[in-house]
Image (cartoon, rainbow, N blue to C red):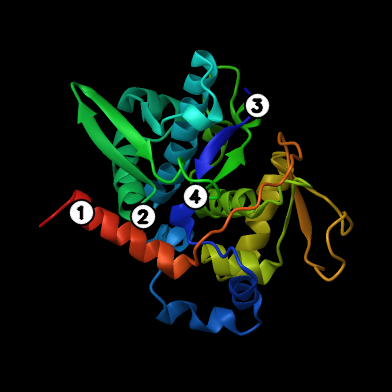
Amino acid sequence: MSWAQLPTDWMDLPYNKYDREYFESDQVLDALPNEEPTGLRTFVWQKDGSSSSAALMVLIALSIELGRQHFRERISLRDREPTVAMSLDKLVRVTGFARKSVVSGIGLLEEAGAVEKRLIGRANVYELLGLKNAGHWCQIPSDTLLRPDGALRMKEWPRNRALLDALKVYMALLAARNVAFNTASLSWTGIQRWTGIARRENLGTALSILFATHLISDAGDRDERSNIDKSRRYRITGLRPRPVIEVEIAPPAQRRESRRAQRRVSNPT
């Protein structure tokens, strides 16, 4: 198994041309403090500390565990269910975070609309929201991210704000990746807008971590896409190009309202 499915619907990333231009505009960062944080921008070091980093690593761990489960059982992509059971002890072991941080991180993922947790018997079962819908998930390189002992490679990284920033940037690049070329074409302004990393020096540190750990590489400024797009292109280590299937995806605001309506139905007051 070389890759797994990572849910992206909760990230509220732009999928159409209008949203892309808005996220990439020069003045857009000025509006950040006045906007309601959504998606990756809800994970803030000053507010939740290491629990934010734990949350994103838990989501990666759940995605990979689900992919390994499907691989073992030889379930086709079309027939896969987006639910996986994973004990708290295993999540602690795989991520390297304290039990308290992992529990808080799971709560943050539920608030963000990335997962839903249910207790079946004595086991915690997690549903990764959006995996049943085409265009609402992206590939994540399982083999690249796992150590021989089954833990995540990021377990070795320092537990500081730079870890959180690097995780957010990595997820944004995964979600924005053009699967036909295996590159994500994003400007620094676009990455800042998607992740909420306002200081460019912090973004530079996050990218340096991803380069140094060989999770991404510089794809240069040339591939077969349009020459109009001059943004820097990043190649994701461990993934390969594949044919593109066109799907129609609703704008971020419409997807947010749909998720809220679903949560109201699932959790009536």
Query: Residue 30's x, y, as percent?
Result: 54, 83
Q: Earlier in the sequence, mark 1 or mark 3?
A: 3
Q: Residue at x 48, y 77 (%)?
A: 32
Q: What SS does tag 3 mark?
A: loop
Give the CA distance from mark 2 to mark 3: 27 Å
Q: In the image, which is nearer the foreground, mark 4 or mark 3?
A: 3
Q: What SS does tag 2 mark?
A: helix
Query: Where does label 1 land, which residue?
Result: 265
Query: Where does label 4 land, which residue?
Result: 160
| Label 1 Cα neighbours within 10 Å, binned few <14 / some 14-19 / many ≥20 | few
Q: In the image, which is nearer the foreground, mark 4 or mark 2?
A: 2
Query: Residue 116's x, y, as percent?
Result: 30, 42
Tag on residue 112? 2
Give the CA distance from mark 1 to mark 4: 38 Å
Q: What SS does tag 4 mark?
A: loop
Query: Where does label 3 land, which residue?
Result: 2
Q: What SS does tag 1 mark?
A: helix
